[in-house]
Image: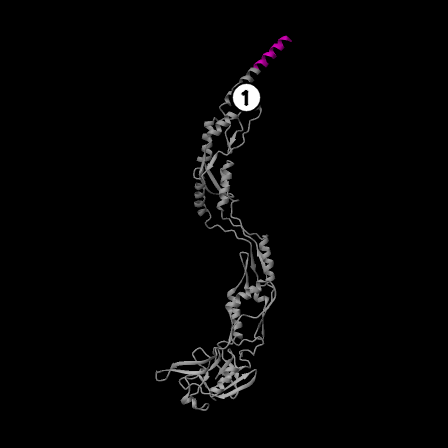
Amino acid sequence: MKKKTKVLTAVLGSLVAVVGAFYVYRGVYYQSHFLPGTSVEGVDLAKLTPTQAKTKLEDQLVNSKYQLYDKKEQLTQVSGKELGVTQNSSQYLDSLMNKQNSWSLATLVKAESVESVALININQTTLDQYVDATLKTLNKDRRESEDAKIIKASDSYQIKDQVQGNVFSKSAVIKTIKQSIANGNQKIQLSTAYEQPKITKTNSKLTAELERIKKLDQITGTYTIAGHTETVTPTMIHQWLSDDNGKISLDQAAMKAYLSSLNDKYATYNKSRSFKSTKRGTVTVPAGIYGWSISTASELPKLTEAIMAGKDFTREPVIVGTGYSKTGYGTGNDIGNTYIEVDIQNQHMWVYIDGQMKIDTDVVTGKPGHDTPVGVWSIWKKERNSVLKGENGDGSNYATKVGYWMPIDETGVGIHDSSWQPQYGGDWYKTHGSHGCINTPPATVAKIFDLVSTGIPVVVF
């Protein structure tokens, strides 16, 4: 028994000596080498000296190649140096070595793990330049992402889904590269770095725009024009409406064409008219300065505003010119029942006020060659004691004083007194006619001057 005890004691002693020697060896060894499980930036530094660790970090992070992938496809490879990677780990590695406890019994059972600490620098300018140059090639022929948008069908509107493209986003690629390097990954997956659609089908602004455009699509507008009615239908508005990147707009060219069509249909400016004369029945009178038209330029923004307000509307268009009546005088006829009528053939003039003839008188119109211009004109000014100037047939100039002057066109023709005329009417005008003006007996023209207002139509035929 004593012999067995001595043998066991000897064995245990030897084992303790071996373990002790191993413990001392490991303790000494790990005073200059990193413990198992030590890693920095994803690089395993176990059993390496700080100098060896620095070299390995340099090789792994700076000199080695990184592969850029799009899913399973390798796109290219690049060194850490080309990406702007540098490392400065000496001070940290020395500090890490000083901090580790090489004599801890724990090292005999479990390797000590050291948390990764960022010891690399990435030059942003170098990385930007690399990514710019690389994406110029990689993004060629790739599909752009498309935002969700409102599209017009034949009779409705709907949201078209966004489309995910495969063009790489510079900012996302840079972020992915930095993260991969920090994690020690040399395979850099860029399939998560695609440019993303900015607007998706669930975008609240887009869905609100869809509801708004659907509402606008149901509007009915009514125009009242000189006693007539025209309807702006939902079908017309549907054709005009569009949505561009979430902004609702109306086709201004199409709307302008519509307003022009209304003007062609109803306006009287620059149009001939049928006129029921006193002696010659219904005659056709050419256009003059009298008449009205729709101001398309002024009405277009008004119509746009009315539609975009989102409610049914009724309005009169913006009118320019003279003779417009809300009740209307019939299509193409805006003369009404207050006017001056000058019949050249009969050398006679009538003044009608509210349909009642107030004055009629013989006149002298322009001598042939200086004919009084036919058309629907208008008295645009009333003036007392004027001097009319012009040129005689022989080339000499004249200056004639008149007591009453009412110009009717843009060339200097008008109604005035003519004390020098010994007679009026008949064929007198053929040899003793004016230079185009309507010569009127002085006493009569004074009455006309007092009776009429500026703007009254003057029908000459």
Query: Which residues fall within the magenta stretch?
Result: 1-14
Q: Nearer the viewer, residue 35 or 337?
A: 337
Does residue 254 sit above or below 192 in this rendering? Answer: below
Which secondary structure dominates the residues rendered in magenta?
helix
Q: Nearer the viewer, residue 138 or 274?
A: 274
Does residue 174 appear in this view?
yes
Specify the amino acid type for callout 1. Answer: Trp
Residue placed furthest toward the left: 395
Does residue 221 appear in this view?
no
368 displayed left or right of 21: left
Could you tell me residue 429's position as x and y percent? 43, 88
What residue appears at the point 54 percent right and 66 percent down from the top-left corner?
302
**Image quarter in which the N terminus is found:** top right
Does residue 201 sit above or below 351 in this rendering? Answer: above
Q: Which residue is mark 1?
A: 103
Could you tell me residue 287's position as x and y percent? 48, 79
Check if residue 7 falls in the magenta segment: yes
Image mark count? 1
